[in-house]
Amino acid sequence: MSSPVKIETENFWIRSLTIQDADSRLVQWLNDQEMQDALNLPKLDMTPEKLRQFIVSFNNRNNYILGIFSKAEDTIIGFYTIDVNLQHQVGHLTTAIGDKNFWGKNIMPEIILAIRDYFFANTQVEKLSARVLAKNRRVLFNFIGSPDFPFEARLVKECRAPDGKRLDLLIFSAIKNS
């Protein structure tokens, strides 16, 4: 396991989650149908023990789970997972804001730019991509027209929803030194 990630922005702390973070709020978010739909996940039936096992499966080398903590609220509001292909030096971001009080508050640009800057400066990652379901308007509004994570591609019917329906993915990417 590599060193834990610690990032500070004006309004947030972003850090590697630990098993001590596996509390009832995270379990509740992961079991929330709206959250599962946004992440294109089947019903999870998450428990605290399953969440702890999930968190320890991340090694801070080729996969990361980073909690997003509000400084003002002094609490976790969501998380990122980042899967890194070490050979190609590419990372794929997934985000979930579980605290519904933060939905629609335009917090993602502050957080994702800090994560981008951290990964480009402290790892061998040269490209970060966010793969967003075309139907996920809450996340898309953070990317559409962004000069920092420009639109790269539309993957038509790229993934299957839990109900079997095929879904399009939109790719937004940042490339180091470009």
Image (cartoon, rainbow, N blue to C red):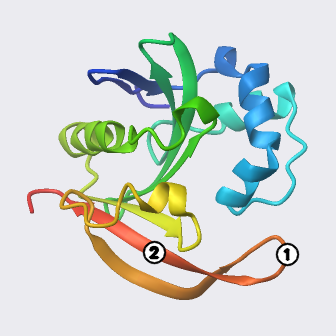
The image quadrant that residue 32 belongs to is top right
Q: Position of residue 135 (x, y in %)?
A: 59, 71
Q: Is residue 87 above or below residue 6?
A: below
Q: Position of residue 141 (x, y in %)?
A: 41, 59
Q: Are marks 1 and 2 in contact (CB under 8 Å)?
A: no
Residue with the mark numbered 1: 163
Question: As drawn, is 51 to the left or to the right of 14?
Answer: right
Image point (33%, 66%), residue name: 144
The residue closer to the viewer here, 161 or 50, is 161
How many marks the image carries: the answer is: 2
The image quadrant that residue 39 belongs to is bottom right
Image point (52%, 76%), residue name: 169
Residue 19's disc number: none
Q: Is residue 124 above or below residue 143?
A: above
| Quadrant placement of the C terminus | bottom left
Sort mark 2 into few (<14), some (14-19) or many (20+) by Cα contacts within 10 Å. many
The local secondary structure at tag 2 comes to strand
Image point (54%, 36%), residue name: 79
Question: As drawn, is 65 to the left or to the right of 147?
Answer: right
The local secondary structure at tag 1 comes to loop
